[in-house]
Image: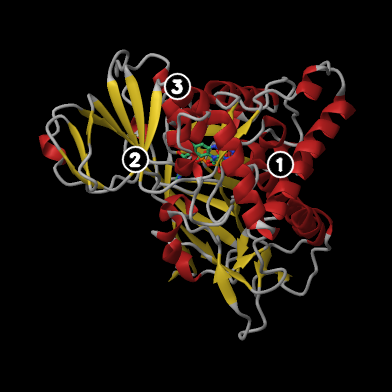
Amino acid sequence: MATEHFDVLIVGAGLSGVGAACHLRMKAKDRSFVILEARERLGGTWDLFRYPGMRSDSDMYTLAYDFRPWREARAIVDGPSILRYLQDTAREFGVDRHIRLGWRVTRADWSTAEALWRVEAQGPDGRLLQFTCGFLYLCGGYYSYRGGHDPAIPGRERFGGRIVHPQDWPEDLDYAGRRIVVIGSGATAVTLVPALAETAAHVTMLQRSPSYVVPRPATDARAAKLSPGQGLAWRLVRWRHLLLQQWYYRVARHDPQAFKTRVADLARQQLGPDHEARHFVPSYDPWDQRLCIAPDADLFRAIRTGQASVVTDVIETFTETGIRLASGQELAADIVVTATGLELEVFGGVTLSVDGRPVEPGEALGYKGMMFEGVPNLASAFGYTNASWTLKADLIADFVCRVLNRMRRTGLRQCTPRNRDPAMGRRPWIDFTSGYVQRAIHLLPQQGARAPWRAHQNYLKDLYALKLAPLNDGALEFSNPAP
Ligand SMILES: Cc1cc2nc3c(=O)[nH]c(=O)nc-3n(C[C@H](O)[C@H](O)[C@H](O)COP(=O)(O)OP(=O)(O)OC[C@H]3O[C@@H](n4cnc5c(N)ncnc54)[C@H](O)[C@@H]3O)c2cc1C
């Protein structure tokens, strides 16, 4: 097996990997790096998902990188626009030249004696190659690319129509004039239903239980008045979105009942007297699961005009012509879309070990939500669940550059988070009750009860922890291998 060496090896060329590489280009210029990307194209999520209507549900002022502002008036945009933004960023920062497509990283072992990672990757032709690197930066996202979550619904084999999953949308699917049932009530279902309803005969959103769906303008009227040259103004727009989002989150967590009532009122206003708002009144508290956005109230408009409807019920079985529900109701369908979620996967599916000793993701203790106790020279990009992913990905990349520069300055080649308090309590990484999180919670790393072992869902706290707080915090140990 041939071996190549890089100072930094980045796994994945999605939003996090491209951003990480740009930060390296700006702040740790002298480091060599490579991005190994398993797919044939860069972009990750924004290239993979190609269902009708695919879009962001957070605003682009915060989903865009902090170093390359979003200069359009539209805040909620479609997937292809985000992909274009990522491609343009990669080109502008010369990162595209460092991406090797079709290379899946399978395992990585840290050698303490040599202070480097030995990384194994499989290339497009099945060839295995070994890389070594001083720092391993995992940017493989948080879900499996092999396929989405597909629950075993009885009677599937007798259904005469077509069943599709949004993660694997068939290019040739002609749904114009068809009756469609979309199973699910998460962000994907809420996005798909109005988009499909534009040409379908009818779309039914079939949900087991309601989600919070909040109507929101797709365009920021203030940003629309700015010209692209106004750099400071764009920063202010970004901060306004960032702070408002954090404020709404705090308010919703502080007084869930008031938030619930407000969301139900909004749904009632949007739907009018002929449609039931109960389909938009969840039993859980706001932000126990991710909130869904309806840009310009598109979902409510589709329901109001009769192009779409919502049914809250439990599926009994597929039939030859559709789906039968526990209530006895039958939904006729030509196409069924299973918008039933993702399969979570950590570390991009890479098997990690330190000196041959396996790192079990489910037992790993996170440091600042991005490194792991006892695992040297490794960071993982994991964004926020209550705000734009990029906000945290940017902060993590900045922290990694600080660590790399410190190592270069001091000549110390190892940087390892060490927890010196064995009695410190542990908590789940994410406190969401969503099915896709609960199904995989045992596979996710844990966070500690206090800083720096907490994984904050709070940008301002992280801004301090990752960008401003000193690196010598008593937990991050810089060292060299024993001679
Ligand atoms: C439908 C959908 C809509 C979303 N909308 C929003 C939103 O509006 N706002 C928001 O903040 N977040 C949103 N998210 C979350 C979204 O995933 C993040 O915004 C962001 O795209 C994550 O970027 P990433 O680079 O970390 O991961 P990904 O986008 O998943 O990219 C990971 C990349 O790493 C590659 N990779 C993985 N494992 C390996 C390996 N072992 N070897 C080599 N390459 C590997 C993958 O092929 C992929 O290209 C959404 C997610 C989905 C699924």
| Vertical relation: 146 (above or below) 160 | below
**Does 339 sit above or below residue 169?**
below
Which residue has dot 1 on it?
24
Q: Residue at x 41, y 26 (%)?
A: 51
Of residue 110 and residue 347, the one placed in the foreground of this image is 347
Count of residue discs: 3
| Image spot of residue 425 (x, y percent) | 60, 79
Q: Element under label 3?
A: helix
Q: Earlier in the sequence, mark 1 or mark 3?
A: 1
Q: CA distance from mark 1 to mark 2?
A: 28 Å
Q: Is 356 above or below relative to 172? A: below
Please tell me the numbered disc located at residue 127: 2
Left or right: 78 in relation to 303: right
Checking the image for residue 245, the label placed there is: none
Can residue 383 be seen by looking at this rendering? no
Q: Position of residue 412 (x, y in %)?
A: 74, 64
Disc 1 under 8 Å from ligand 1? The reply is no
